[in-house]
Amino acid sequence: MNQLPKVALSPAVYLVGAGPGDPELLTIKAQRLLMQADVILFADSLVPQEILEIVRADAEVIRTANKTLEDILPLMIDRVRSGKSVVRLQSGDPSLYSAIHEQIQALTAAEIPFEVIPGISAFQAAAARLNVELTVPGLVQTIILTRISGRTQVPEAEELALLAAHQASLCLYLSARHVKESQEKLLQHYGAETPVAICFRVGWPDEQIWVVPLSQMAEVTERENLIRTTLYLISPALKPIQTGFKDHRRSRLYHPEHTHLFRPR
């Protein structure tokens, strides 16, 4: 593998997605930033320590699990104004449940340059671990990423039962503490035998995944005492797991009867 280019980092905040936990799922850009940054602020309750093995020996590493935004922002602003490059390392992908919205607002107000670097989300890593595609032709073509209302309220128009009516591949984040309520709402539209993948700490060394009928989602969650870092995939696309991948549906894209610009008739 070629060495990563050594490009000097400008004084700025880099909001980097660390992925679900596996250090090998970092993007090349995220890896380069971690190797070069002067300061690393990382959510140590959500990002494994192993990811930091590539940072510079003289980099300042700041853990943020016990800090509030009011603690974190002045640190980032101060370091950038001192001419340093700052990586704010967050779990998963910054576009999903990462609380970067308020960070961006504050950095913009303080006239601090920043850049967002995407990462692999847990739903993508979980689907890969399960060897499934979440958009299967003729079965399901929509993916919904959502959560149930808890401390953070979900807008009324996005209420879980309303979204479940689509019977799409539904990826349910941040809901393990409300699993009974979630199951009840999902059962209003999905059949009781709809497969659910309960994914605990995807990408971490202690990762566990259970594939069960929707009717058992709450029972398994409570039996395993799962209260955090748990993702649920509810989808007809998981049915091939139960049937030994004997479903022979296929995409039109590579079908010999399907023509397009690069494969004319």
Image (cartoon, rainbow, N blue to C red):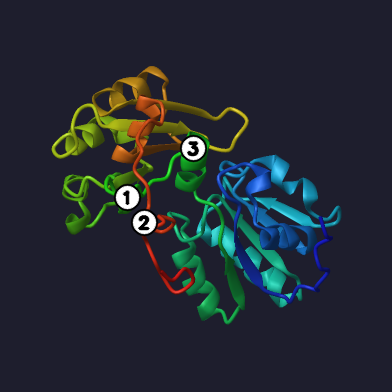
Residue visible at 69% across and 73% down in the picture = 80
> What number is the disc on residue 131?
3
Residue visible at 69% across and 52% down in the picture = 62
Spatial CA span between label 3 and label 1 = 16 Å
Locate residue 23, reporting x and y percent. 67, 45
Contact between marks 2 and 1 (CB within 8 A): the answer is yes
SS at mark 1 in the image? loop
Task: Indicate left or right for 227 with 93 as reference.
Answer: left
N-term mark: 2 or 3: 3
SS at mark 2 in the image? loop
Quadrant (top left/top right/bottom left/bottom right) for the N terminus: bottom right
Spatial CA span between label 2 and label 3 = 20 Å
N-term mark: 3 or 1: 3
Locate residue 128, reporting x and y percent. 51, 41
Task: Indicate left or right for 138 with 32 as reference.
Answer: left
N-term mark: 2 or 1: 1
SS at mark 3 in the image? loop
Number of marks in the image?
3
Quadrant (top left/top right/bottom left/bottom right) for the C terminus: bottom left
Q: Which residue is mark 2?
A: 252
Residue at the extreme front of the image, as rendered: 265
Q: Which residue is mark 1?
A: 137
Locate residue 16, reporting x and y percent. 61, 60
Residue visible at 42% across and 20% down in the picture = 224
Residue at the extreme left of the image, as rendered: 188
What's the amino acid at mark 2? Arg
Tell which tag, 2 or 1, sits nearer the viewer.
Answer: 2
Identify which residue, 103 or 95, lies in the foreground.
Answer: 95
